[in-house]
Image (tube, rainbow, N blue to C red):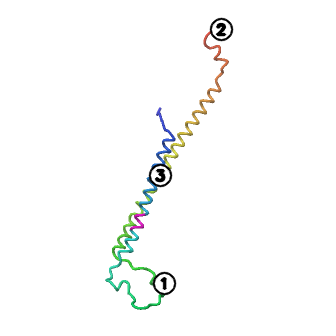
Amino acid sequence: MASWDIQPQGVQGQLRVVGTHAEDLGNALSTLLTDMKEAAEAAGTAVPGSQAAPRSYGPVVPQKAPSWSARTSTGPVAAALGEYAAQRKPDFEAMAHRCQAAVLGAVAATNEYVQGDLEAARNAQSAARAVRVDALKDFGGKKK
């Protein structure tokens, strides 16, 4: 029979450490995506100079841009970064799911172990209660 020696407090401590690292990973991925978005916006377009964003000189009354022009044009760098992010999205999601599955699996296994210990203790106590103490009194020595 296999012997197990799991210490639930130790598992809890390790899960805290893993949780901290998983949170750090989530923050790093979030920062990566934010930085990539900012890089894509800063990269500009492939249209030379003033053709990309016409400048107005002199006093100009601010006007609301028409809805069709609210969309910014993107260049090849922004497109490549967008493609990279789209291709890596399943990998990023898989990392998060694996971390979550590992933590939840460790919690479930530890809970089952503790429940098994409690059940074994209940069984041992029930067996101890079932022993006839009066029969054991006369078992080992003197006869009346």
Task: Tell whether 47 sits left or right of 122.
Answer: left
Amino acid type at image mark 1? Ser
Amino acid type at image mark 3? Gly
Mark 2: few/some/many CA within 10 Å (<14, 14-19, 20+):
few
Residue 61, compared with residue 90, is above or below; it is below
Q: Which residues are magenta?
A: 31-35
Tell me residue 128's x, y (percent). Answer: 62, 26
Q: Nearer the viewer, residue 98 or 10?
A: 10
Residue beneath label 2, please? 143
Task: Tell whether 82 sits left or right of 128.
Answer: left
Residue most toward the front? 59
Residue beneath label 3, please? 19
Tag 3's secondary structure?
Answer: helix
Tell me residue 140's x, y (percent). Answer: 60, 12
Residue beneath label 1, please? 67
Mark 3: few/some/many CA within 10 Å (<14, 14-19, 20+):
some
Residue 134, compared with residue 55, is above or below; it is above
Callout in the foreground (2, 3): 3
* Residue in view at x 40 percent, y 89 percent: 56
Which numbered disc, 1 or 2, marks the residue that appears first in the sequence?
Answer: 1
Which numbered disc, 3 or 1, marks the residue that appears first in the sequence?
Answer: 3
Tag 2's secondary structure?
Answer: loop
Tag 1's secondary structure?
Answer: helix
Mark 1: few/some/many CA within 10 Å (<14, 14-19, 20+):
few
Magenta stretch encompasses residue 55: no
Task: Tell whether 8 sits left or right of 33.
Answer: right
Tell me residue 77's x, y (percent). Answer: 34, 73
